[in-house]
Amino acid sequence: MSRFNTIAILVVAYLAVFAQSTMNEFRQLFGVQIDLLPSLVVYASLSSGVVTLSLVSVCSGLWFDSLSANPIGVSILPLFLTGLFIQRSRQIILRQQPFAQFVLGASASAAVPLLTVLLLVNTYVQPLVSWFSIWQLLVMSAIGGIATPLWFVVFDHLSETFNYRTIEESSFRADRQIKRGRQ
C-alpha cells in the first residue's frame, strides 16, 4: 500500500471525526451519535499493514476523544484491538464481498463502544449506561455496517484515480517472431 493511501485514510478519518461531532441532526432525530471510525478501521485493517492501522487508530482516537467527553486516549485501544483482530485474520476474510464487509463493520461498530465502556468502567469516569444504550448500540452497528462497504468503494475509486497502475511484464512478447532451425 502506498503512502498516498495512508494519507487518504488519515484525511478521511479527520473529516469523519469532524463531521460526526458537528452534524447533530441525526443525533437529534434518533438519539444516537454516529461513529464512522470503527468502519474506517475495518477498511484500514483489511487493506493495509499494521503501521497504517496504528496511525489510524491513534490519530482518530485522539481526535475523537478531544471532541467528546471521553478522557483523552481511551478510544485508541478499542480501535486498535478491533483492527488488529481483523488484520490478523484477514487471510480467511472475504475482503471483496459486500456482505462480509457489512458484517465486519457492524461487528466492529458494536465492539468498539463496548470495549470503550469497559475501559471507562475501570477508570474514575462513570459512563451513562441504560436500557437506551442497547438502542444506541444497534443503530451504531447498523450505520457502521452500511458505511464499511462504502469506504471500500470510495478508497478503491481514489486508488484507481490517483495511483499508478502496475504493468505486468513478461519475457514473451506477442509480436515477437521465433525462428527455429539453422540459418
Image (tube, helix red, strand yellow):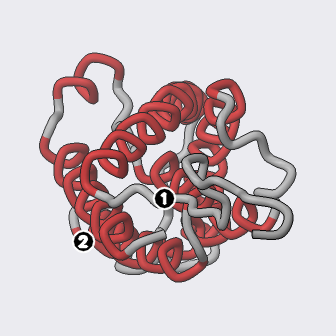
Please tell me which of labels 2 and 1 falls first in the chain: 2
Quadrant that contains the C terminus: bottom right
Q: Residue at position x 37%, y 70% from top? A: 6
How packed is label 1: few (under 14 Cα within 10 Å), some, or many (20 or more)? Answer: few
Left or right: where does residue 56 sit relative to residue 24?
right
Marking on residue 167: 1
Q: Amino acid at mark 1?
A: Ile
- Residue furthest to the front in view is 183
* Secondary structure beneath label 1: loop
Whether residue 131 is visible here, answered yes or no, is no
Left or right: where does residue 65 sit relative to residue 150?
left
How packed is label 2: few (under 14 Cα within 10 Å), some, or many (20 or more)? Answer: some
Residue 118, horizontal then vertical, whole percent: 65, 64
Marking on residue 12: none
Residue 95, horizontal then vertical, whole percent: 68, 43
Query: Which residue is more in the foreground, 177 or 27?
Result: 177
Image: 81 above or below 94: below
Q: Residue at position x 83%, y 69% from top? A: 182
- Residue furthest to the left in view is 22
Quadrant assignment, res 11:
bottom left
Whether residue 129 is visible here, answered yes or no, is yes
Q: List the residue tagged with mark 2.
A: 66
Q: Amino acid at mark 2?
A: Ser
Contact between marks 2 and 1 (CB within 8 A): the answer is: no
For the residues marked 2 and 1, what is the alpha-carbon distance in whole angstroms? 44 Å
Q: Residue at position x 50%, y 26% from top? A: 146
Residue 24, horizontal then vertical, whole percent: 17, 33
